[in-house]
Image (cartoon, rainbow, N blue to C red):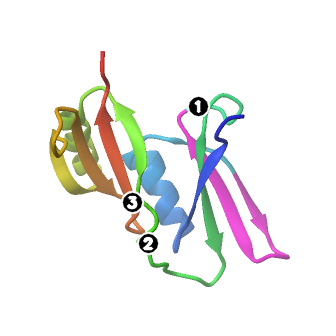
Amino acid sequence: MRILHIMLRVGDLDRSIDFYTKVLEMRLLRRKDYPDGQFTLAFLGYGEESEQAVIELTYNWGVSAYEVGTGFGHIALEVDDVYLACEKIRGRGGKIMREAGPMNAGTTIIAFVADPDGYPIELIGRKD
């Protein structure tokens, strides 16, 4: 078994695709409208779906916002340099929720950014 994808409901699909592709530098792997169900799915990631887990963005037509909720935690991305990643993300218009620095009660360098719908994304420094 393996993880295939993580699904997030979004209020503006194009805005979210722009964030994941332009700010976090993912690739749009596929996008499809489902007129009978009145929703659109978009799959994004850093590699092919056959090789790694991806993010599925679900846009339900006519729904412009969702509550993030208390049960959802975050998406985690490994990066080479958390400080540099934050700089680049900020420069591309991304919102930093927690600046880069050691995690609480630990030494791993982390940061958090928010996607356009408020979903938290943790950046974790690569460990050698």
- Is label 2 or label 3 in front? 2
* N-term-proximal mark, 2 vs 1: 1
The kind of secondary structure element at disc 1 is loop
Residue 115: give its label.
3
* Picture residue at 48% right of the left edge, 61% below the top: 16
Q: Does the stretch in magenta take in 101?
A: no
The kind of secondary structure element at disc 3 is loop
What is the crowding at mark 2: few (fewer than 14 residues within 10 Å), some, or many (at least 20)?
some
Is the C terminus in the top left, top right, bottom left or bottom right quadrant? top left
From what the image shows, is residue 127 above or below residue 49? above
Between the residue at mark 2 and the residue at mark 3, the CA separation in whole angstroms equals 11 Å
The kind of secondary structure element at disc 2 is loop
- Kindly identify which residue carries mark 1: 47
Tell me residue 118's x, y (percent): 37, 67
What is the crowding at mark 1: few (fewer than 14 residues within 10 Å), some, or many (at least 20)?
some
* Picture residue at 42% right of the left edge, 55% below the top: 19
Q: Amino acid at mark 1?
A: Gly
* Picture residue at 18% right of the left edge, 37% below the top: 106
* Along the viewing direction, whichever of 66 and 20 lies nearer the viewer: 66
Disc 2 to disc 3: CB gap under 8 Å = no
Q: Does the stretch in magenta take in 35?
A: yes
Specify the principal SS of the magenta part.
strand
Residue 68: give its label.
2
Between the residue at mark 2 and the residue at mark 1, the CA separation in whole angstroms equals 26 Å
Q: Which residues are magenta?
A: 31-46
From what the image shows, is residue 61 above or below residue 102? below
From what the image shows, is residue 95 above or below residue 128? below
Between the residue at mark 3 and the residue at mark 1, the CA separation in whole angstroms equals 20 Å
What is the crowding at mark 3: few (fewer than 14 residues within 10 Å), some, or many (at least 20)?
some
